[in-house]
Image (cartoon, grey):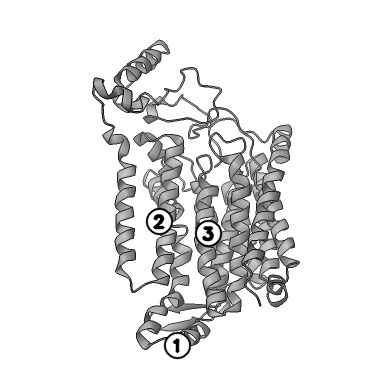
Amino acid sequence: MGQPVREYLLTLCVTAAVTYLLTGPVRKFAIATGAMPEIRARDVHREPTPRLGGIAMFGGLCAGLLVADHLDSLNGVFERSNEPRALLSGAALIWIIGVLDDKFEIDALIKLGGQMIAAGVMVVQGLTILWLPLPGVGAVSLTSWQGTLLTVALVVITINAVNFVDGLDGLAAGMVCIAAAAFFMYAYRIWFGYGIEAAAPATLFAAILMGMCLGFLPHNMHPARIFMGDSGSMLIGLVLAAGAISITGQVDPDALRMNLSLSGSEREATHAMLPVFIPLLMPLTIIAIPMADLVLAIVRRTWKGQSPFAADRGHLHHRLLEIGHSHSRAVLIMYFWAALIAFGTLAYSVHSASMWIVFVIVALSAVGLVLLLLPRFTPRAPRWAEAFVPPRYRRRTRLAAASVAAEGGEEWDEDEGAERTPVGAGVSGVNGATAVGPRSRFPDRRKTGASR
């Protein structure tokens, strides 16, 4: 089989193009059907925005699978494995549940049950974890019910982790796209680099997932014209989980170990054995940020005596806004950390013997911490240097913004910078905030609902 990079690129481009072209008509359809819920207390956008973006993403998924089935280098995936059909079946079910939730806001427990059923549908069709490679033990074969429980748990956790992080314009689609890119490189290396054909479905799933996210992002970047809704967030979460399950439970570690032992010295083979165990780590690292948000949300809500499914404004992206980051900067910071974790793990799996990778990861982590705390250290330029610095560092601009806030009846903190327009100062027509200050600045919105 020839090197199928061009076929993957074609599949990605077709998926992205179909998703992009369908999003515009889907937006009009969402407006016509009234899939534009009122603004809730935890929302950061300021005018009703249509949902149902998952319809376009599901269309891109179907188009990507259809194109791949007709390509010489990729149609073997459909002939040797039933995993693409299992993915399509589970995706169709979770997509229908998401569309109903975007329109009618169904109960959270019903959605949870639907997620488990969708995972079960994939398990019945063969997309399940068969064994786990454990360090020091080797490949541990799982019984049927153990594999089913582990598969369902991974699917449900990944879906809800992605759903929880979908709170800012372009955040969920961008983070999942970054994770899919890292996962694609890892799966392709296992397949083509080591000749493990069982990794081909996971590689295809990652390429299609990148296309879905890239096609939707132009419509969803701040200020967003449409949201993916639960129909989109649960869909991409399921596709991400399907790829992780495929390469974790279907790739035989013994076959990979045999290929590694045939090349290089014993020391090189020992370092190269890391890819045998990376399947345990990669599915966790690619959703590390959403997973941390999910765990913190559950702990926070149960500590307050609330339901774990209760909505609030305590997610990581909300905290970035409260620190003083603008909407776009908060999204970029989340992108940075997602890329650092995913690609850092990928780089370490390729060159585990190099300490330079560890040093680079530590240095980039320090840069990320500085970016997180940047609003706390906004410098004030002296008067003679105001002509050479951005407007937000100029004292005159801050004073002018403070006077505008005073006329609008808003309190203004000079330390926050002039680029942050206070809520209520004539920006109600903007779909999304350029920046959000402390929580008290949000208007009192009484209505709450399901997640975005």
Name which quarter of the figure residue 72 lies in: bottom right
Q: Which mark is residue 376?
A: none
User: Seen in the image, is 129 located left or right of residue 386?
Assistant: right
User: Seen in the image, is 82 located left or right of residue 185?
Assistant: right
Q: Is residue 313 visible?
A: no
Residue 230 vertical placement versus 195 (above, below) = above
Which residue bears the numbered disc 3? 181
Disc 2 crowd, CA 10 A, few/some/many (<14, 14-19, 20+): many
> Quick one: SS at disc 2?
helix
Q: Earlier in the sequence, mark 1 or mark 2?
A: 1
Which residue bears the numbered disc 2? 340
Name which quarter of the figure residue 228 lies in: top right
Q: Earlier in the sequence, mark 1 or mark 3?
A: 3
Q: Is residue 68 visible?
A: yes
Residue 109 x, y percent position in the rendering: 57, 51
Residue 2 vertical placement versus 341 (above, below) = below
